[in-house]
């Protein structure tokens, strides 16, 4: 019998998501737990598996459509349960937003593949709306072109190849000057909305300082030599994160958040330190929960796990929720200073610049080479003043420049009052 797969609640407060890519097509046989479709929420890409063995009989949405939570996503004829008609409430109306052209193209795309390119001779050429628009602009008859896509589909490249054979200067100029338009959607759109909201509602101020990480890099190498494996990489990030948590203990206001109408300030007990990650779907900020309770190796494992997930774009939305303060390692790509935007509702964010070998004077006024990193803080000036963030940064910097002080502070976490 046919069953409708109902799109489940896949995140807190999420009521809709965009269909990114169908992994199957109508008529395909699938197995239980096989991935059927990737959808994009306002936080990340989520893989949706099948709950049954059977045959796909209906895809209720096209790629790019917005699917609704608690509504049918696809229909499946469950293996071994016989034949029956689709139920009357299969939500056909959700596909009504697609244009007739897209619907016809989708139907044609489901026909059996033919071997090799063919010439489209029917009045209705298999292609996309964007290619049709290009053909109209260049006054081309698509039926005269050879389609090199599946089932003879005429691709954009086919049109460009045809135009490139026109040796007139006008044709060449048109091809060179062609603009490319793409929709703003998915993670990029959500990021734009959130950044615009943060900038417009939070009075930012920036504080910049430099940190001598020469000793920290030696300490990191010691940890790497002792503990690093193929499954555990020791980078500087776990040290930055742990030192930040230790400094927050003495300056808890850096780990606070305000409510929407700015009538309450909450000092958050958990140090959920976010990391800005440049993933394939855009900027994501997963956070390591309860850093104040974790050791360096535990943090290193979380950094590896969350970075890998964020870069793939397939991450649990819960990993992106609840962050209290953020580190952006822009220096990994280049640049020394930045003016980062606060990840609302947090009240502070720090951007790490690239590490440079620079000349500095030691205590005996000798010129020596040191490893220097610039840090750029942005703070919510409604909550934090310049003096507070300067004192907080001084403490954080001391932990980083003298790793022994960080170890002593970590020991105090384990054995309170030991000093």
Image (cartoon, rainbow, N blue to C red):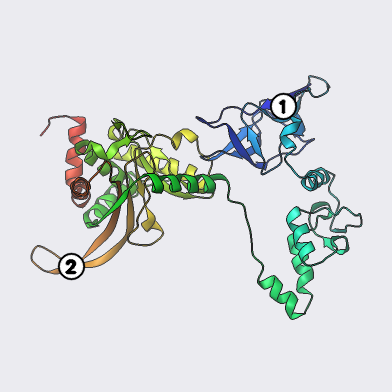
Mark earlier in primary sequence (2, 1): 1
- Place of residue 35 in the rendered image (x, y in percent of width and height, measured from the top left): 64, 35
Which residue is at 36% across, 34% downward? 261
* Gap in angstroms between the C-alphas marked 2 and 1: 68 Å
- Place of residue 390 in the rendered image (x, y in percent of width and height, measured from the top left): 20, 50
Check whether the beta carbons of the residues at disc 2 and disc 1 lie within 8 A of each other. no
- Place of residue 3 in the rendered image (x, y in percent of width and height, measured from the top left): 74, 23
User: What is the quadrant of residue 202 in the picture?
Assistant: top left
**Which quadrant of the rendered structure holds the C terminus?**
top left
On screen, 344 above or below 81?
below
Relative horizontal placement of residue 134, taking residue 44 as reference (left or right): right
Dot 1, how many residues are within 10 Å of its Cα: few (below 14), some (14-19), or many (20+)?
A: some
Q: So how many labels did they put on this image?
A: 2
Q: Which mark is residue 368?
A: 2
Q: Nearer the viewer, residue 96 or 67?
A: 96
What residue does disc 1 label? 53
Q: Nearer the viewer, residue 146 or 307?
A: 146
Residue that protrudes farthest toward the left in the picture: 364
Which residue is at 49% across, 42% downward? 309
Secondary structure of the residue carrying tag 2 is strand
Relative horizontal placement of residue 232, taking residue 355 as reference (left or right): right
Q: Nearer the viewer, residue 100 or 202?
A: 202
**Which quadrant of the rendered structure holds the N terminus?**
top right
On screen, 13 above or below 239?
above
Which residue is at 30% across, 34% downward? 294
Q: Is residue 375 visible?
A: yes
- Place of residue 190 in the rendered image (x, y in percent of width and height, measured from the top left): 51, 44
Relative horizontal placement of residue 345, taking residue 249 as reference (left or right): right
Dot 2, how many residues are within 10 Å of its Cα: few (below 14), some (14-19), or many (20+)?
A: few
């Amino acid at each position: 019998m046919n069953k409708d797969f109902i799109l489940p609640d896949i995140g807190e407060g999420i009521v809709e998501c965009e269909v990114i890519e169908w992994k199957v097509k109508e008529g395909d046989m699938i197995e239980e737990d096989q991935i059927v479709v990737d959808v994009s929420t306002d936080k990340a890409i989520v893989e949706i598996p099948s709950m049954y063995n059977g045959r796909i009989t209906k895809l209720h949405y096209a790629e790019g459509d917005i699917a609704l939570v608690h509504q049918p996503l696809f229909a499946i004829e469950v293996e071994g349960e016989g034949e029956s008609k689709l139920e009357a409430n299969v939500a056909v109306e959700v596909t009504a937003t697609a244009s007739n052209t897209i619907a016809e193209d989708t139907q044609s795309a489901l026909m059996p593949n033919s071997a090799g390119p063919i010439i489209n001779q029917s009045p209705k050429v298999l292609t996309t709306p964007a290619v049709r628009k290009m053909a109209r602009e260049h006054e081309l008859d698509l039926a005269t072109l050879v389609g090199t896509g599946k089932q003879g589909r005429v691709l954009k490249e086919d049109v460009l190849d045809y135009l490139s054979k026109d040796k007139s200067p006008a044709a060449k100029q048109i091809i060179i000057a062609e603009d490319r338009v793409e929709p703003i959607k998915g993670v990029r759109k959500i990021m734009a909305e959130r950044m615009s909201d943060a900038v417009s509602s939070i009075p930012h101020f920036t504080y910049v300082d430099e940190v001598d990480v020469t000793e920290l890099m030696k300490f990191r190498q010691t940890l790497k030599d002792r503990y690093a494996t193929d499954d555990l990489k020791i980078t500087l990030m776990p040290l930055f994160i742990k030192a930040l948590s230790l400094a927050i203990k003495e300056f808890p206001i850096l780990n606070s958040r305000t409510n929407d109408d700015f009538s309450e300030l909450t000092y958050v007990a958990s140090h959920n330190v976010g990391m800005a990650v440049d993933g394939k779907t855009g900027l994501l900020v997963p956070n390591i929960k309860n850093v104040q309770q974790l050791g360096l190796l535990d943090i290193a494992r979380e950094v590896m796990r969350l970075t890998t997930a964020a870069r793939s774009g397939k991450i649990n939305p819960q990993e992106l929720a609840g962050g209290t303060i953020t580190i952006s390692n822009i220096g990994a790509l280049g640049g020394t200073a930045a003016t980062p935007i606060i990840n609302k509702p947090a009240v502070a964010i720090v951007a790490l610049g690239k590490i440079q070998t620079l000349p500095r004077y030691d205590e005996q006024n000798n010129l020596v080479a040191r490893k220097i990193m610039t840090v750029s803080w942005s703070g919510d000036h409604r909550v934090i003043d310049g003096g507070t963030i300067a004192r907080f940064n001084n403490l954080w910097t001391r932990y980083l420049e003298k790793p022994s002080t960080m170890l002593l502070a970590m020991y105090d976490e384990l054995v309170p009052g030991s000093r």
